[in-house]
Image (cartoon, coloured by chain):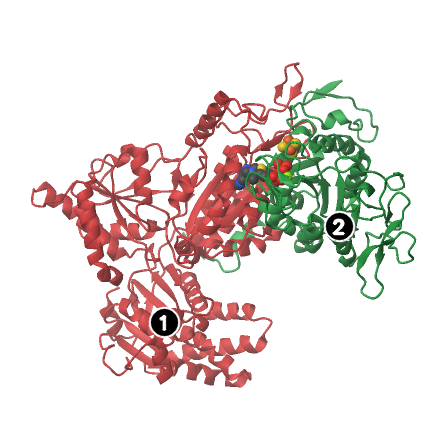
Amino acid sequence: MPTEQLSERSEGARRLENVVIRFAGDSGDGMQLTGDRFGAQAAALGNDVATLPNYPAEIRAPAGTVAGVSSYQLHIADHDIRTPGDQPDVLIAMNPAALKANVAELRPGGVIILDTDAFTVLGLEKAGYDVDPLTDGSLDAFQVHAINLTGFAAAAVADHNLKRKDAARTKNMFALGLVSWMFSQQIEDTIAYLHKRFASKPDVQAANVSALRAGWIYGETTEAFANVYEVKPAPLPAGTYRHMKGNKAVAYGLVAAAHQAGMPLFLGAYPITPASEILHELAALVSNDVRSFQAEDEIAAIGAAIGGSYAGTLGVTVTSGPGMALKAEALGLAVIMELPLVIVNVQRGGPSTGLPTKTEQSDLLQALYGRHGEAPMPVIAVRSAADGFDAAMEAARIALAYRTPVILLSDAYIANGSEPWRVPEVEELPFIGIDLATEPNGVDADGNPIFLPYARDPVTLARPLAIPGTPGLTHRIGGLEKADLTGAVSYDPDNHDFMIRTRQSKIDGIDVPPLEVDDPSGPPGSGADVLVIGWGSTWGPIGEACRQVRAEGMKVAQAHLRHIVPLPANLASVLSEYHTVLVPEMNLGQLAGHLRRETLIDTVGYNRTRGMPFWTAELASVITRVIQGIDEDASGAAGTKPVGDVGARLAAMSEAGAAKPAAHAGTATASQHDATREAGR
Amino acid sequence: MSTVNGKAEEPVDGASGRRAPTVADFTTGQEVRWCPGCGDHAILSTMRGLLPALGVAPENTVVVSGIGCSSRLPYYLDTYGIHSIHGRAPSFATGISINRPDLSVWVVTGDGDALAIGGNHLIHALRRNVNLKILLLNNHIYGLTKGQASPTSKVDTIGPSSPFGSLDNPFNPIALALGAGATFVARTIDSDRRHLTATLTAAAAHKGAALVEIRQGCPTFSAIPRQPSRAAGQTSPEEPDNPAAPEHGPIRLSPGLPIVFGAKEQWGVVRDPSTGELGIGHGGDSRVVVHDPGTQNSTYAYGLARLAETSLAEPPIGVYRSVSQPSFDQLYQERLATARPDGRGDLRSLLTGSDSWVVAG
Ligand SMILES: Cc1ncc(C[n+]2csc(CCOP(=O)(O)OP(=O)(O)O)c2C)c(N)n1
Ligand code: SF4
Ligand SMILES: [Mg+2]
């Protein structure tokens, strides 16, 4: 949205195509709830919505400090969008620290609504302001609405006999009411929500509703705001929609998968940010045949899940990087025992505890290779919040059909972000059930019927599963190498070699759909010269960036990998049709290295690990420079160096070091330079 | 006559249409690979004899183990089973037990498996009272990895990794299990088949987590000096006048009977009336304790468990504690049942939720 629009006066509501709003406050100010409700209201209006919650690792960092700031950004639009937006148009700052932490990203000319109640000497000091930003002219580039949000909220709830502190806490609802009015949103859904949420505390419930209403009325009756804005509904395909968060989508996908497999879902999990919410969601779904178990650690969690799979349920475990590391040994066991299992890794910043509430894609290599022995496992990735549902179902499908553990990679951005989700009809969901063995499938040397747990399906190479309780099919499985067919312990060298190759072939042979390329200018080979390929949550920013680049008259193709193991069969042939393949990743090039290993095709990386998703503008600029690099190269003007040139890489890296402060500012970066430089191969 | 998994099937039992299971039904064709004289042989053959008597069909029995010599046992029992990873058997077994309360689930583990790498899982399985029969085959050494000191090895144990003697204090598995809130805790020995059978039978009958420490000989790494075991009442001419003399053999705990030992039952476990502490006294003393494994307060069992460390050559054998508490699988199933009083929830309404909206085409 061009920001000038926000200042133009007009009659009635001004129509905006899209707007980016960021609510920011102290961790205790309820910004996540506020943002979430605003998103739900927008979604209910029919807008396309994408959200980006961002909060500190501490439950309560020191109040009023920049470290304690929690924010929630929303992008709402009257058309299909894929990201929560880059720079906000509107910033709601509940205290000086929230202003300080976020104002640098606000679009010039953007709107700031701030709570004057918090702009005290002490508040400014805690935020690290030497001079009051309200008076020193530093906000002149913005439209500032300094309002005593706390004071108005407290006045609005004066009748509800709350303690002073509790009364002040309703300021977030006052702010939500005000911003809702500003964007022509209805607050009835949120009132209903508050009724439910605070059902057991009538005073708090009534106070929050009063504050919300008061904020809305404040907007309507004061002359503070020149305009009301409106974002019209986005044209979405017909259907029933729901505002869906990534973690919830994954949880629902797992429930639907178990339902469609005709099995109970069994979750073994140990709490860890940002995956715990999946445990919480599933723990509540007992009536949908979901059984959950909070284990003593991540090893026990996967152990129980494997036990559950052996006993005839769909075994699932959910975790994040550190927990994934603990599960590695048990994953190997699930591989050799060939049991269905879904392992969800909601990635966060690593290594070690790293940035536990921030996003990153740095566990890809761990997923691909992080086990001892030859232990191949399918790896698939979620690309957006709503996509969590389909991705989880696909993971379960593969796990069941091929009797294998499957890693499903999500990340903190997907986990906490939300977007409208078209609720599928239950009838359109695939059936993914499998037949359990009930009869002997072989004969012993004497011709007696026996059960051969490692006799395989000739097509899928899946082994038969017989669950305890099935008469006549008793058998033992375990970590020692199995003899082909019988599954008896075998130390035979040729058998070991055969079994290793068979397990690998089974995974290699998993049927995955071909890679599709999105390029309006033509199919691979006759369209764009540059293909941008990604995996996981970069799907949104890459997609938006490609749209932006195309809108500027350039050609670019986009492809996205849902399946990383095994890769789509046409991958190498697709990649080889492009002059340059650009791989933006929130890591130091893990997919790029994997692609090189698997296809012998060199790609150009764009790599950032700032704990936040890419900005559209950032990627658009990278793509543009890559395209221009090719053009320059073709005209012989640029002295670019070929990809793989170690000297060029090192030079780029040292420049990266020099350019560090700029990199923090969030636009021009060393790796971007790297990408540009390498573009002309 | 039909055969399944290579075994004869003769329906005899009128009610189930199947004959009662036999030792052969619980025996696999796998070659047993333990050292000659290993205590594990006796434990295996006791299990093979015991399982048919429990009246649970082989297919309804699951045996889960970790890693170690002892953990090979499931391969030799023709039931369902998992030979899992080192120390983690209780976690796999927990996943099976809570999902399938219809099954009889056993865990076979070693002192290293259960108490070193798997200590965490053991205590949590016990505190949750998961319906598992946990057989801890305690040879006081790491057998499979060739004789290193284990968490139950005595201080000063010489082994390849402790050539000058180990420094760390051993665990007392009984005390540990009691500390974790175990509802059934017993100790037995491989060399006394009758005691072993009786103890395992009692464990099998217990609803909830049952921990049975089986003191087991490892002739190859001979960690514990083997003692001649002898039932109380047997006489020995050279018996010394000392309750800690190895000749007495272990104290045998029998419910409802006074705890006395020695050839003439001249010794007994007595309770100090002022402190309540257990100690060794004379067999005829009026303060001799009558054994009651059903004592709710585990201090009593704990006192018994600690006796050996100060005043006896060998720890008492028998059931230390057997109290009734709801098992985890039972609580879990009840929770599942109460949380969905009207049967299975509908997937469609779950997915649609209460906050959805419709976009017309
Ligand atoms: C993760 C892991 N660490 C180490 C080992 C090696 N290991 C196998 S068995 C064992 C000790 C077994 O001792 P115990 O449980 O007492 O069994 P025993 O052989 O004495 O019956 C060790 C350390 C392993 N298999 N896995
Ligand atoms: S090493 Fe010891 S425990 Fe292992 S099989 Fe041999 S005798 Fe038994
Ligand atoms: Mg041992």
Q: From the image, state the color of chain A.
A: red
Residue carrying label 2 = B308
| Chain hosting mark 1 | A
A39 or A363, nearer to the observer: A363
Q: Does dot 2 land on a helix, a strand or a loop?
A: helix
User: Residue A516: image x %, image y %?
Assistant: 32, 39
Q: In front here: A294 or B198?
A: B198
- The 10 Å Cα crowd at callout 2, few under 14, some 14 to 19, many 20 or more, is some
Does A580 sit left or right of A315 as displayed? left
**Image side of residue A78 versus residue A643, left or right:** right
Q: Amino acid at mark 1?
A: Val
Q: Quadrant of residue A642?
A: top left
Chain letter, green: B
Q: Judge from the rendering whether residue A473 lies leftward or rightward of residue B183; answer left or right.
A: left
Same subunit under labels 1 and 2?
A: no
Q: Disc 1 marks which residue?
A: A66
